Image (cartoon, grey):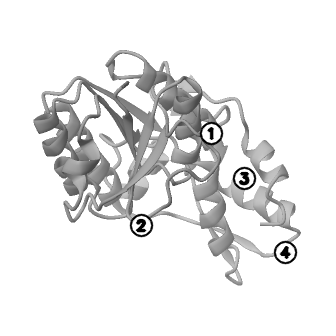
Amino acid sequence: MTAPFLVTGGTGTLGQHVVPLLRQAGHPVRVLSRRPRPTGDGRDGEDGGLTYVTGNLLENEGVEAAVAGATTVVHLAGGPKGDDEATRNLVRAATEEGVRHLVLISVIGANRVPIGYHRMKLGTEVAVAESGIPWTTLRAAQFHELLHTVLAKMTRLPVVPAPRGVRVEPVDSRDVGARLAELALGEPAGLVPDLAGPTVYGLDELIHSYLRSTGTRRPVLPLPLPGKAGRALRAGTNLAAEGADRGRHTWEDFLSGRVDA
């Protein structure tokens, strides 16, 4: 029997794109989920090629069982805190199991942006790179879904703050999922080129476009973003490095399908 691909975070925004692509390529997939899920829900035929296992990477629960028998691990699970420790737990189990390819999703600017989240993501990269397992790491820009959620919260305020000079290049999760599946099906490649969206926007542009798409009227107040983080973001440390790959789907494409969200 072919060894399964283990996908952590396989039920999330990114995993919902990656898992079907791996299945379409003919590989069995095991999804690690923090909540119990039924196996064989009808979406995967009757070949038993999609299974779910329950575990918690941060608490180091069920990790060995999830990794057992897998030769490729695609690590997509993440959260606002603890990703570095969760990744170290996964790496330990994967090393003991003899995993031959570890694929990681990270964030553009992990090594440059002086924000706690980016430092944490850099910690996940270091854990993978120092694991001794052949690895591939993809740094991606912020997903459209994330920016949509952030803007929805910001625009509930009576006056919407717009940090001056901050630029972003949001990427579609479908594009990231397709690239990750391609990398997982290939040979370990180390740190590959960044993946960002096709367009660089000022954050104020995105705020105005969101307001227009939802028919919301709010005054927008440009404000300076203070401190070391503000200086770094204005310098573009969150933007893709030279030679980056670019997704096909634009922010406008995304908004056109989400105006009622």
Dot 4 falls on a residue whose secondary structure is: loop
Marks 3 and 4, how far apart at CA: 15 Å
The reply to whether callout 2 and callout 4 are in contact (CB within 8 Å) is no
User: What's the residue type where badge 2 is placed?
Assistant: Arg
The residue drawn where x is 70% and y is 73% is 155
Sequence-wise, the earlier of marks 1 and 4 is: 1
User: What's the residue type where badge 1 is placed?
Assistant: Gly
Marks 1 and 4, how far apart at CA: 48 Å
The reply to whether callout 3 and callout 4 are in contact (CB within 8 Å) is no
- Label disc, if present, on residue 45 of the rendered structure: 1
Residue 73 is situated, as x and y percent measured from the top left of the image, at 33, 35
74 relative to 145, above or below: above
Q: Does 222 sit left or right of 49 as displayed?
A: right
Marks 1 and 3, how far apart at CA: 45 Å
Q: In terms of depth relative to the viewer, which is nearer, 214 or 184?
A: 184
- The single residue placed furthest to the bottom in the displayed view is 158
Q: How many marks?
A: 4
User: What's the residue type where badge 4 is placed?
Assistant: Arg
Dot 1 falls on a residue whose secondary structure is: loop
